[in-house]
Amino acid sequence: MIVHLTREEEDALDEKHGQSISIAYKILLSIGKATNAERLIPVDWVHLSGVNYNTIGEAGVNFLTKYSQEARFVVPTTINPMGYDSHKQTKLSNNFKRQQGEIVKAYEKMGSIPSFSCIPYELFQLPDRGHNVSFAESNAAVMANSVFGLHTNKESSLSALASAVTGKAPYSDLRINSLRDPKIKINVETELNTELDYGVLGYFSGKSVRESCVSFGDHTSNIDMYKTKSLAAALGTSGACGMFSNKEINGESISFDREEAKSVMDELNTTESGDVIALGSPQLGMYELKLLSDMIGDKRFSKKCMIFCPRSIYEKASNSGIAQRLENAGANLICDACTCLSPLLTHEEYDGVITNSVKAAHYLNKSNGVSVCLNDLRSIINEYTK
Amino acid sequence: MNYSIKCKIIVGGRASGRLLATKQPINFLSSVDHSTGMITDKNHELCGRSLKNHVLVFPYAVGSSVGAYSIFALKSNSVSPSAIICTSKTDITTASGCAIANIPLLELCSDRNIPKFENYDEGIIDGISGILQIKKV
């Protein structure tokens, strides 16, 4: 299959509109070939990952600094969390802060909306259902497709950047209506109660299916935002799957029982306890902050606790008094950053991190080299507040 | 016995190197050390092996969308694979990372019998004609 470019797109690829646009078309062409697209189509919104210095490193900073000299975004573009909360004191090195600052500056220059959030779907009025967008950040792509009816492939930082600069994406895979039906089902044969149970299911499913859309039957029909985000984030972390659905199918199915759940826990739950509680990967929204504050009541955390949320959510939570209640309980609310791949959670400083996030557990274990005690929110609150 | 396979070209270019083959997908952000090119994930069968100058043969990338920057970082640090072959569907992370890093990327055509790739054999990639040549060592 050949990706047919219009005359204008060919010109752009041939550097007639500058080098940065040509690079963007080169990326779109490669992912178009990879996903068997026949043509490019317009997108109405882009969400970018690749903002945290801890993930993209010096090579990323150099690339973005150079790229942003010329490139400009042509569609609304939100961006992922960065490495830390710049409104708070931190022990991070000056080099880290300087490099992080360069990244922020580069995205600003290109015209991004300074969201510093992995949950744009809870903060912005996104395009209506059925519209095409380009979402990098695996949880956001899965949520956009599965919950908000937007059409996106599971984009990479660079493919979404190319969409932001051109306003286009290859018409392929989950952007095509007929390919958005699940071809495989996970048969859930064990009880799912907590948000952690849904995270474990998502992690197992991502590893088990190579299709772009998976069905969980009616197990995902009436679940709250916390469970949905936990499922979507874990699915996006372990696999290549970009969408889940509750549509029933007669085709192939894979069983998920206690044994499968145990194998995920055996991989990710690497310590019995920890010295810090970290909540929010994906970042917590208003629903989860309220849930948490109701669960804690008048009690206080017996361990250090970090809660990661977008700044705009923090401001709302401050207006309604929820932020103060959590802070009075001893929690530190951190904005613009996220648990997963946070430089604030290192093995030099912590022996173990307690969290309910399967996504965070994956990256803390494998990237940060920190042991993780994985438990559900209710159990964490019961055990570590008094 | 030496042999050649016709592949789909995703990112063109010529390269060669010893094969490093796996049936397990890779999360380029969490499973690879970007400064050394070593695979560090204890749950991966290639743990402890280096990607540097190898022809990486693997099904597809999983997980983080930032993996595309990871591929670029490997190249910037001179520890990237010399070429990559996807044996299943080529994913967007690998394709976009290779496009920016100028790493030749081919996909095995799904209608062909996939040979058993032996590590240490030499792979020669012609990303212009899409031919992958395997030389037994």
Image: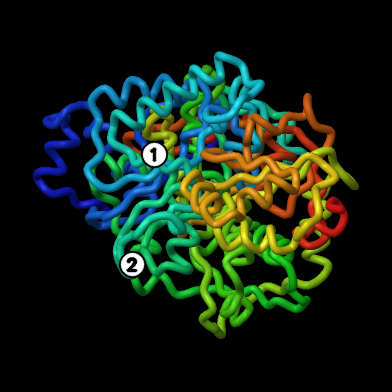
Q: Amino acid at mark 1?
A: Pro
Q: Nearer the viewer, residue A295 or A27?
A: A295
Q: In the rendered image, which quarter is residue A195 located in?
A: bottom right
Q: Nearer the viewer, residue B119 or A183?
A: A183
Q: Where is the C terminus of chain B found, in terms of image quarters?
A: top right
Q: In the rendered image, which quarter is residue A371 located in?
A: top right
- Percent x, y for residue A330? 75, 43
- Percent x, y for residue A386? 87, 53
Q: Where is the N terminus of chain B found, in terms of image quarters?
A: top right
Identify the residue at image location x=69%, y=59%.
A292
- Percent x, y for residue A32? 32, 50
**Secondary element at tag 2:** loop
Farthest right residue? A272
Q: Amino acid at mark 2?
A: Ile
Identify the residue at image location x=78%, y=64%.
A261
Left or right of residue A353: residue B24: left
Q: CA distance from mark 2 to mark 1?
A: 30 Å
Identify the residue at image location x=52%, y=29%.
A86
User: In this rendering, does residue A134 appear at all?
Assistant: yes
Q: Where does label 2 land, which residue?
A: A176
Q: Where does label 1 land, which residue?
A: A114
Is residue A298 shown above or below A101? below
